[in-house]
């Protein structure tokens, strides 16, 4: 599925077994992101994103940034 999300105050969770795409045209900031998508296509993004909290990517999940940047400011990483 596809989603259009703006800067928010809660963690972004991408969970599923089908490919997911975040379609945005601007830099987006999230306090945390959880990638739990185990599809072969994983999660793709179409723009730069900033995470200010935790980044959790479950084993077997894919976060494909393409040519975009993921800026982690004060973030912690886990998998």
Image (tube, grey):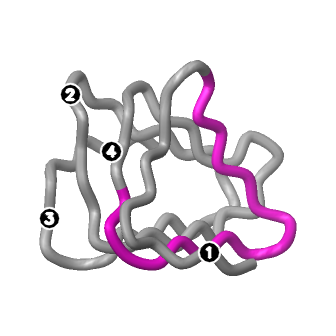
Badge 3: few (under 14), some or many (20 or more) residues near its Cα, within 10 Å? Answer: few
Give the CA separation, mark 1 to mark 4: 24 Å
Give the CA separation, mark 3 to mark 2: 14 Å
Above or below 2: residue 15: below
Tell me the residue that label 3 is attached to.
8
Badge 1: few (under 14), some or many (20 or more) residues near its Cα, within 10 Å? Answer: few
What span is colored magenta in the figure? 51-66
Q: Where residue 33 sits: x, y (%)? A: 44, 69
Dot 2 or dot 1: first in sequence order is 2
Q: Where residue 48 sits: x, y (%)? A: 38, 33
Disc number at residue 3? 4
Tell me the residue that label 2 is attached to.
26
Q: Which residue is drawn at 37% across and 62% down?
A: 73
Question: Please, what secondary structure does the residue beneath circle 2 have?
Answer: loop
Instruction: Say whether residue 61 is magenta.
Output: yes
Dot 1 or dot 4: first in sequence order is 4
Question: Please, what secondary structure does the residue beneath circle 1 have?
Answer: strand
Give the CA separation, mark 4 to mark 2: 14 Å
Give the CA separation, mark 4 to mark 3: 14 Å
Badge 2: few (under 14), some or many (20 or more) residues near its Cα, within 10 Å? Answer: few
Q: Do the residues labelled 2 and 1 touch (CB within 8 Å)?
A: no
Question: Please, what secondary structure does the residue beneath circle 3 have?
Answer: loop
Q: Which residue is drawn at 50% across and 26% down?
A: 68
């Amino acid at each position: 599925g596809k989603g259009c999300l703006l800067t928010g105050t809660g963690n972004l969770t991408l969970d599923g077994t089908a490919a997911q795409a975040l379609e945005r045209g601007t830099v987006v900031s999230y306090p945390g992101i959880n990638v739990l998508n185990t599809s072969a296509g994983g999660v793709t993004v179409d723009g730069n994103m900033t995470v200010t909290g935790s980044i959790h990517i479950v084993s077997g999940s894919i976060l494909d940034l393409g040519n975009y940047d993921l800026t982690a400011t004060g973030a912690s990483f886990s998998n």
